[in-house]
Amino acid sequence: MTYIAPNFAPPTGQTPALETMAGGGPRDKLAQLERIERDIASSLQSAGQALQELSKDKPSLKQAESHTTSFLKTLQEVENGMQLQINYLTQVSTGQPHEGSCYSAQKDLQMAYHRMEHVKSRLGELEKIRMEHLRQRQGQMVRSYSLPEHLPPPPLQHQQLPHPMPHPQHQFH
């Protein structure tokens, strides 16, 4: 029961035979994860059997050791498989385009939507500020055109009235 992600060297201490497992597509990755999941269940079963054997009035040490050894072996395989999967995911999730993966494009789209919503929100805030400023400005303009009650009215400005005397050019000779 070994798990290999393609193009990966096995972690230190593993056998090179792990490198030979073929397959790197999404189906292969899912199959590898399913095997890991089955091995987790198997290791839990072995641990349970070992505990069950030890809880008996007269446990068989040979049986308990066998279940314990099976548990530890399966657990090591699960750990190796999970490490390879994590290494693979670390490599493909760095934001670099990956063959057969649309994660990067989806992430870019999601971030663009997020930025767009932020801009909309900010524009809404700026519009509120602008409208408040216009209301305040309009209120100041109305106040500046109204006369205060405690001041006398301004003097009348000199208006040009028609002169009672005709202009010299219009005089009769």
Image (cartoon, rainbow, N blue to C red):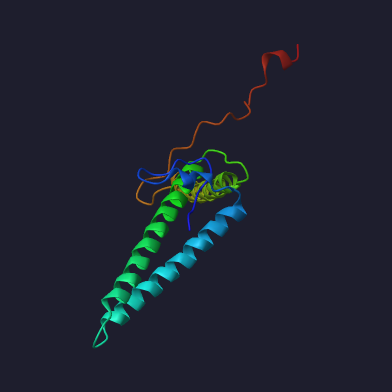
Residue 54 place in picture, x, y as percent: 26, 80
Q: Residue 27: which quarter of the image?
A: bottom right
Q: Is residue 15 left or right of residue 165?
A: left
Looking at the image, which residue is at 48% across and 37% down? 156
Give the total number of marks visible in the rendering: 0
Q: Is residue 145 above or below residue 169?
A: below
Residue 120 place in picture, x, y as percent: 54, 49
Residue 145 visible? The answer is no
**In front of the other: 68 or 132:** 68
Looking at the image, which residue is at 37% across and 67% down? 70
Looking at the image, which residue is at 56% across and 58% down? 30
Farthest residue to the right: give it.
173
Residue 79 visible? The answer is yes
Farthest residue to the top: give it.
173
Farthest residue to the bottom: give it.
57
Farthest residue to the left: give it.
57
**In front of the other: 142 or 51:** 51
Residue 40 place in picture, x, y as percent: 43, 66
**The C terminus: image quadrant:** top right
Residue 5 place in picture, x, y as percent: 51, 47
Looking at the image, which residue is at 51% across and 62% down? 35
**In front of the other: 63 or 4:** 63
